[in-house]
Amino acid sequence: MAAAYAALVSLTHIIHQIEHHPRPPLCLHKQQVHSLAQSLSFLQQFLETYTSHAVYTEEAQHLEMRIADAAHSAEDVIESQIVDRILDQTNSNSVDFHRRLEDAIEHMNSIAREAIEIKETLERSCSTSIAAGSSKSAYTEQRFVAVGIDDALYELLDKLTGGITDCQMIAIVGMGGIGKSTVARKVYENQLIAYHFDILAWITVSQEYSVIALLQLIALKITMPSDWEPLNRMCEDELGEIIYRSLWRGRYLIVMDDIWDIEVLNQLKIFFPNNRNGSRIIITTRLSNLTYELSNCYTHEVKFLDEDASWDLLCEIVFGERNCPLELVEVGKRIAKNCSGVPLSIVVVGGLLAKSEPTQEYWEYILRDLSSVVNSEDDERCLKILHLSYRKLPLYLKPCFLYMSVFPEDSVIRVSTLIKLLVGERFLKPMSGKSHEEVAEDCVKELIDRNLILASSYCYDGKVKMCKMHDLFRNLCLREVEKQKFFRTLTEQSLGIPQDMSSERRIVIYKRKSEEDHFPDQVFDALGSAKFIRSLISEFHFQEPLPLLNTRLMRVCSLVDESFPEAILQQVNLSYLSLTGNVPLLPRRIHSSISLLWNLQTLIWVTNAIIPSEIWKMPLIKHVIFSKAKLPDPPIDDGIVLENLQTLLKIYYEDFTEGGPRSCISNLARLHKLESLGIVIDPFPDVEDTRRHLVRNLTFPHSLKKLTIGHTRLHWEDLTTKIGSLPLLQVLKLKWQSFVGTKWETVEGKFCSLKFLVVEFCDLEHWMTESTHFPRLERVVLRNLPLLKEIDSSIGDIPTLGSIELEFCTISAVISAKTLLEEQEELGNDGIRVRVLLSRKNKVVESLASPNFQVIT
């Protein structure tokens, strides 16, 4: 249902955008808006209900496609009219437009009426059926060879048999297929557990459950056989009382495998007494965020197997106690490595290899097509288990999850870019009180908490900076994408590209893997017919302009192109535009008609750009990112001042002569919502006095959270007055002679929110400060400071400080950092890490290395 839901939400967004835009390109009749809004709201609610009952049958698929088509039709009518209005097309007929829109609304209303009948049938069915619940997962008997879990075993045994006497919950967390149940079973069956606990019970909860059935199952396991027969006639409270009394008799261990919902824990644990004798409860779950809601809970995360453990597991499955033939070792290790550390994948592949002749030719064949083996039709175990995670997703998360597969395999994805793309696609469900970016961030975080995507690095504030998708889940996504026609993928290996792609809404083009930089001609022909696409994402560098002229309705465009194709400016509905490639030496000019892009929110152009003053007329734009660009002054007669701008990066100021362009730095103070700013001043001005005067008048908006500056050549005392007083500033990067002078002395009451500080390439010798001057500082990076004498030891007293990094600094500064660290360790503070990067080997510094003092040469 993800495609249909995304289409409905997208249409809702466009109506809202038109109604609330300061300069709407179109007026809609109130009656039409009301009728359309009613159908959209009902159908969204219907899909949310329908997905919880319906299996993905042909009937469900057909219904979804009809809903998606109806929403797409209405959207095409509205956005085509917007294009005609903005570009002054002669065929912009208001009467014809409202007639076509009325037809689209009636089509949607007719589907809504059918959906009402289906909804009533579902409600009658639900009211007459009894939820039996599942006391046994379809995969309860799935058993993995326990390779590489010895460390986890000992850690969990220690938690189970030692420590606190209060009843404690232990959560074993990890993605589907990674071996959570295996770890739990290995612990559960350990002889020490049997000796330590008086009462043991294992139940599998699964995604659909009945509380009374689970209580019956627990009672069966912990009571005497003579009590079993009456259990079927008891209510929840009666069963709970029996369980409570039975568990009170001794030290117990209850394992609840495959938990999907905090509610089932709340309903069951009230019957588990805290008899303060060291009883324990183990749960396994794919949902990391579930553990946040549990008190007195210890979390153990199951990690991916390393290459050695993966190979050991594969060998044990294929050969048992026999050795692997020498000629298969190399290819076998590559197969194990390509399973990416997921035991479930290794088991599936190993099972296939164990049933075949162990020949090098066959194993190499398996290696070449490993992805299709893991997801093979002959053995769907792996995919089915992973598919449970997708099926259980809330409907609003499913489009976001499927969208992750637009990125190439093994991509490390910048979360900030992903968020901008999700906002541009407009299928995020609005949430009261939250911006679209906040909603997107919450969705990404929830997918990470559910172990559907993986965090690979973190920002200074603990938020995920980079993420990636495991190959298995990406393959699952691609299957669903194809089934639901969510987007079309084109590669150089694409076969049978249809000549007519007019029904496609999103097209993704992956780069050719061969050295030849040429894409099949049929791709150009196919794109020429894709007149209704909303998204075009390509990592391929085309040798000729893309055929965009027939593509009037795009909202997301990401291309590898150093130029600014003129056809782009015809895409007036664009919300996200990214053009990347080699940065040219000479600046490229953006045409003034960019202001026609009434809906643009993100503009990324990795080039040396000249921005027209018309950009100030774009009220919705939030993120502007260049490699180098000049920000012009706004038109004198225009009241709109980029009122929603949040990100402005790589802005460059030059030519400070009296006759030069104004490009006044004071314009920055007018950007009242600006959160992230990067500016550079021309390091070689013709008139130094004029330049210094203008820079000294530099004023930043108080909304800033991140600031990067370079070549400003301000004095260190200016840092306190101009930047230190910014109340929300969390990240400050001082680059390339941004400040001059040898002495920086801080004062109290400034930098109140600063968490991350970078100082590099300047003449700083002495930095004198107190711990109270940076009350929230967490990370300090000092880079290429050839004159810095030492680091003030009081920095170590900052209670929030976690790390100090010195890259290519003086030996005396490094030694002072070591002294600072030792002083803190003597005080019992072992939470600070120091990382030193040297330009060449130095035995004195290398001898200082310790667990908290890392030296890299």
Image (cartoon, rainbow, N blue to C red):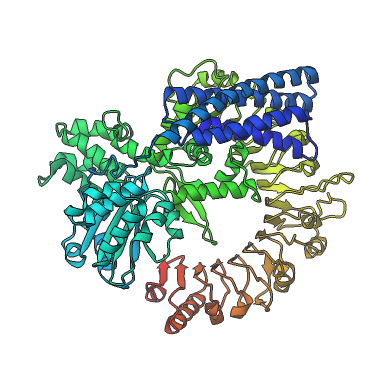
The image shows residue 66 at horizontal and vertical percentages of 55, 22
Counting labels gives 0
Q: Is residue 539 above or below residue 748?
A: above
Vertical relation: 642 (above or below) 558: below
**Residue 362, located in which quarter of the rendered image?**
top left
If the image is split into quadrants, where does the C terminus sit? Answer: bottom left
- Depth check: give the residue in front, 412 or 812: 412
115 vs 807: above or below: above
Q: Given the current orientation, which residue lies at the most extreme top position? A: 499
Residue at the spot x=75%, y=61% of the render? 700
Using residue 245 as the reference point, say whether residue 841 is left or right of it: right
- Residue 527, given in percent of the width and then of the height, sits at 57, 22
Q: In the image, 601: left or right of 661?
A: left
Res 116 visible: yes
Residue 326, given in percent of the width and then of the height, sits at 14, 42
The image quarter containing residue 611 is: top right
In the image, 162 versus 649, the foreground residue is 162
Residue drawn at x 24%, y 41% is 347
